Image (cartoon, rainbow, N blue to C red):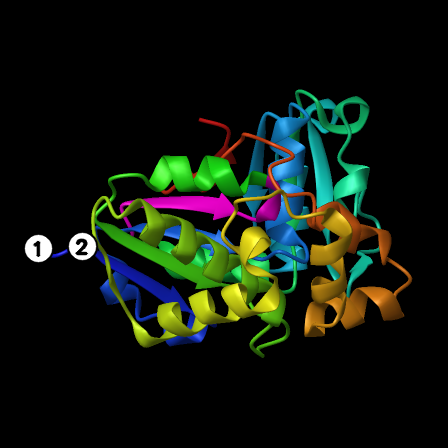
Amino acid sequence: MSSILNVYSLPSLADPNTLVGGTVVIIDVLRASTTIITALAAGAREIIPCENVDRAKSLAAELPPADVLLGGERHALRIDGFDLGNSPAEYTVEAVAGRTIVFTTTNGTRALARCSRAARVLVGAPVNASAVVAELSGVAQVHLLCAGTDGEISYDDILFAGLLVDRLAQRGDPPYALNAQAVTARETWIQAFPLPLSLGAEPLPPERLAAKLRDTAGGRSLVAARLEADILDAAQIDRHDVVPELDLQTNRIRRP
């Protein structure tokens, strides 16, 4: 079978049957992917994604209170009664080390639910970009699944998908056949910054990437909610070397 690299701009555009046997990378830059990566890098034991609030509360109630935290958002804000929201800065070593986090967000956790038939499901964002590229090295069937914002395509996710496509295509091992959305995502990334930056030949200053992220559906939502600091946190390329992976049997996201 030939090697393929597909991008899906929204979860609804990915037929679960096409993901069978492949490695999926869930992309929700603002902010679920960034927060999940940050939490596990800070020593969280595991993250249990839930699609809805009631399920998250019910599941958390089944676990020892000292071991569990509820995290997540609706309309960008922390859910009433939850311990944490969806801001990466909240997920510090002091707050989450050794804890299980039951986590629900508007977009990211719903995207995860789309991937039950994949071989592997990873979580990616700019904060672990190089680690994701390394993890995908030599993988023949790659699917980059963008979460979007409230059912709409979000430029922040497309930008990062384009970064991954470009990095993997530069490696050329294996040579990938790109779907149309992958071609578009790669062009979007390359056109967003001058060549030394977009090609990875020079470090991309976080402020430069944050400026692009701010002008997206997700970015504008965070600015309106006075959570603009989260955008700069999400723009810190390669801050972490953790690539979270969803255990499809237990529905737990863990650090490998």
Residue 181 screen position, x and y as percent: 38, 73
Q: Helix or strand or loop: what does disc 2 sit on? A: loop
Left or right for 238, reference 89: left
The reply to whether the magenta stretch includes residue 125 is yes
Quadrant of the image occupied by residue 156 = bottom right
Residue 51 in view in this figure: no
Towards the viewer: 77 or 128: 128
Residue 3 marker = 2
Q: Helix or strand or loop: what does disc 1 sit on? A: loop
Residue 217 in view in this figure: yes
Crowding around mark 2 (Cα neighbors within 10 Å: few <14, some 14 to 19, many 20+) is: some
Quadrant of the image occupied by residue 153 = bottom right
Residue 142 screen position, x and y as percent: 30, 53
Crowding around mark 1 (Cα neighbors within 10 Å: few <14, some 14 to 19, many 20+) is: few
Tell me whether the residue at label 2 lies in contact with that at label 1, contact meaning CB atoms closer than 8 angstroms.
Answer: yes
Q: Residue furthest right?
A: 226
The residue sitting at 70% across, 49% down in the picture is 234
Residue 57 screen position, x and y as percent: 68, 48
Quadrant in the picture for the N terminus: bottom left
Amino acid type at image mark 2 = Ser
Boundaries of the magenta span: 118-127
Residue 1 marker = 1
Towards the viewer: 251 or 129: 129
Left or right for 56, reference 94: left
The residue sitting at 53% across, 44% down in the picture is 201
- Is residue 58 shown above or below 158? above
